[in-house]
Image (cartoon, grey):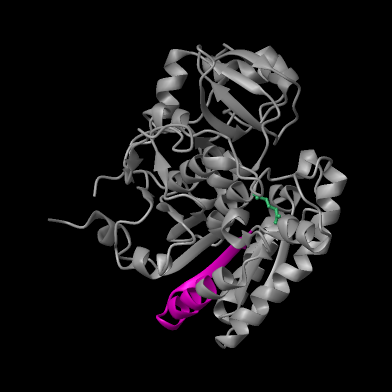
Amino acid sequence: MKNIRLETLTYTKKILIKIGSAVLTGTNGLDLKIVDALVTEMCELVRRGYSVVLVTSGAIASGKHRLNITGKLKSIPEKQAAAAVGQGRLMRVYSKSFEKNGLYVAQILLTLSDLTDRQRFLNIRNTLSTLMEWKVIPVINENDSVAVDEIKFGDNDNLAAMIANIVEADLFINLTNIAGLYDCNPAESKKAKFIPLVSEFTDEIEAIATAETSSVGTGGMKSKVLAAKKVTAIGIPCIIAPGKKKNVLTDILAGKEIGTLFLPMADRLNSKKYWIAFTLRSQGKLVVDDGARKALLEKGKSLLPSGITAVEGDFAVGDPVSCVDGNGTPIAKGLVNFSSAEIRKIMGLKTAKIEQILGHKDYAEVIHRDNLAITKQNTRRKI
Ligand code: GLU
């Protein structure tokens, strides 16, 4: 019988590993034994020829512990201040542990605005690929102390998914404090059934994960499943696995049944389309008719004015905008060639009318297919 895990991992070289706060912290702050165990495994993977990029939480939890703060931090400034205390400690612990194994680490702290700006996105990509060439381990976290709501990734699962795209990882391993995905919350029901493999990204899969978190984590299983959705959309398999399990990383790469494996989807979104779909925030909506829906989803066409039935929001040329069908279901996201005011004037009309109405026709399409990412996609690669 085929081992679907081994087959999925056949060409794996670059691995993005995300470690959650609940894995790294115990009652006494950062759990140095866990850090050492995971770092030793990561170093072994590097020795075996894999590239490893690490996204790690734990700054806030570590800062809280240093400051003897018990219970949840309430305000954003408190969390930001705790992160500022804990981030240095987190890096010191990692750097000591990696150096024991002969490897150096590089700290990278990011906010969402660093990635929504295409130039900065490309700069970060260059830095990361240089570090990987040098066999230095990038240790990435959100720049919590400066991030405010509009520029926050929200949680490190989301950040890790974006980094997986930037480094074009072959595998995303998301280490957490439970065994993987269950069909309902195992903390609430003894009947919860473990799901070892997700081969179709159905609405049910999305719906079963809840946002409940541990006392130190941020996103809960929901954000892990959403991160899995994002990376599998660009063809990267994802494994949500228990970070405290002995030899977890080595066993995953040996194809052992650990955690939940999410298979990659059939169509790989290229890096630019992924950036449009998952990094940029939508500035408005275009409602499209059935014909346009089909043209986008089934034929890979550009969006023309004739297929648009309504425009929501105010946006400018070049802004990211969502396309939704008549039921309001999001199907795609793209960069528009016309402003919202212009689209309101030309929607429903044939392309030939654009010039007559607007007095110019720089583009025939409202969104060119090269700048259009399909976000509604459930089919996965059959292995
Ligand atoms: N960036 C936060 C930290 O390092 C964690 C965010 C999360 O848990 O997702 O403490």
Q: Quadrant of residue 193?
A: top left
Q: Which range of residues does the magenta coloring cover?
A: 38-56
Q: Nearer the viewer, residue 345 or 214?
A: 214
Residue 382, horizontal then vertical, whole percent: 25, 45
Residue at x-position 51% and y-position 62%: 16
Residue 273 inside the magenta-drawn segment: no
Q: Nearer the viewer, residue 241 or 147?
A: 241
Q: Nearer the viewer, residue 48 or 346?
A: 48
Residue 112, horizontal then vertical, whole percent: 72, 48
Residue 239 vs 190, above or below: the answer is below
Please state, as top left, top right, bottom left or bottom right, where the N terminus lies in the image. bottom left
Q: Quadrant of residue 376?
A: top left
Residue 178, horizontal then vertical, whole percent: 47, 49
User: Of all residues shown, which one is farthest toward the left?
Assistant: 1
Residue 42 inside the magenta-drawn segment: yes
Left or right: 216, with 165 as reference point: right
Residue at x-position 66% and y-position 20%: 355
Q: Quadrant of residue 160?
A: bottom right
Residue at x-position 59% and y-position 34%: 334
User: Is residue 213 visible in the rendered structure shown here?
Assistant: yes
User: Is residue 301 visible in the rendered structure shown here?
Assistant: no
Q: Nearer the viewer, residue 261 or 136?
A: 261
Residue at x-position 64% and y-position 48%: 217
